[in-house]
Every structure is written in structure tokens, then in C-alpha cells.
Image (spheres, rainbow, N blue to C red):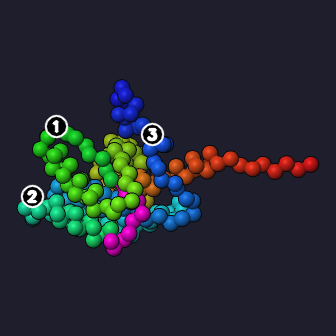
Amino acid sequence: MSRYRTRSWRAFDPAAAAVVFTPGVSVRILGLDPGSRRTGFGVIECRGAELVAIAHGCLNVTAAAPMARLRLILEGLQALIAAHRPVEVAVERVFVSRNVDSALKLGQARGAALCAVPAGTPVFEYAPRAIKLAVVGSGAAEKFQVAHMIRTLLGLTERPGADAADALAAAVCHAHARRLAMLAQQADTPRVRQVTR
């Protein structure tokens, strides 16, 4: 664990989310797993405690020239957002490894993906370990474990691809986080106690 609490993936700041969560309202969430060659996406709908998969897949831009990939990611996600109209977006935070070139390309793809999100749509970031912990129960889970749990949690007929599973996992992680925030808001609401004489 990091020496500094704010640098830890376990850190939780309730004041960070400026969104007011309303119980009983159906909410559509878009999960994104940005990549320079393959960008996974997953759209789920929260109906109370029930999570329903609406769409999932992958934008495969491997065949395009490196500079054209960013535009394809942007346009593909813009079309996806226009079709499904998510209210909130959950994205996996960039994991920086020792390869600076890979991190730079991933950052560019992530920027293109986030530019596709319409103005005013809240975007929430989650560390990869936090997503795995929320879905599998272990921050060190393997990709096939994440895909298996996503299939089970959302009742999918077949296991999704790795990129789509990661995107759906980000959306499910956010669904759990927003449900906890809702419960915390309800707990903070003062209750009127009736006094009978």
C-alpha cells in the first residue's frame, strides 16, 4: 500500500462525486477500456439492484494507420453513445508500466475515447485493481476470471471477449460504487421521528 492515502487505489473520497444519485431511477452506464489497437465498450442498465447488459463489444482499429486510429476510436464511440445514450461513463484508469511508448499510445487512445463523451456527461475513473476487486473479489484477478464473473453477474449467454469484459467490468464497478453512494446518502438523510403521547 502506498505511503500516501490519496495515491492508493483503496482511497475513497465521498466529496469527489458531484453527482446526486436518485434511488428508483433506471440509469444507463457506458464502460470503456481504452486501447491504442482495441477499445472495449460495454453498456449496462441499472434497474435498482438489477444490472442488465445492453450492448458490448470492441472497436478494433488495428488495420488502420497509427494516426487514423484515434479518429476511428472517436467516431466509433460517438456513434455508440448516440445509439445508446448513456447517462454516466466509467473508464479504467491508465496503468503506467515501464514502457513509456506504450503508455503514451494508451494515453492518446484514452484521450480520443474521452473526447467522444458529450459535455455534461459525468465520467468516473477506476483503477484496474479496484475494478477487479469489485467484480471478482480480488484485485489480482486474471482476465479470464473477470470475463467469467461478468458473464455470471450479467447473465450473458457466452463469455465476452477480454476487452469487452474489461469495459463491462468498469461499468459494473461503477454501478456498485453508485449504489453504495446512494445508500450513504440515504443514511445521511435526517429521519423524522414521530412522537406519540
**149 horizontally vs 49: left or right:** left
Please state which of residues 143 and 11 is positioned toward the viewer in this rendering. Answer: 11
Q: Is residue 171 located in the magenta-colored stretch of the structure? A: no
Residue plotted at (22% across, 41% down) = 96
Lower sequence index among marks 3 and 2 = 3
**Amino acid at pointer 3:** Phe
Query: Which one is in front, 57 or 13?
Result: 13
Extreme front residue here?
Answer: 119
The N terminus - image quarter = top left
Residue hosting label 2: 66
Residue highlighted by disc 3 = 12
SS assignment at label 1: loop
**Stretch of the chain drawn in magenta:** 82-90
Residue 155 in the image: above or below residue 142: below
Image coordinates of residue 8 in percent, x first then y, are 37, 34
Q: Residue at x 22, y 67 (%)?
A: 75
Q: Nearer the viewer, residue 60 or 144?
A: 60
Q: Quick one: label 1 or label 3, which is nearer the N terminus?
A: 3
Q: CA distance from mark 1 to mark 2?
A: 21 Å
Residue 98 has which mark? Answer: 1
Residue 64, by quadrant, is bottom left
Q: What is the number of callouts on the image?
A: 3
- Residue 148 percent coordinates (x, y): 35, 57
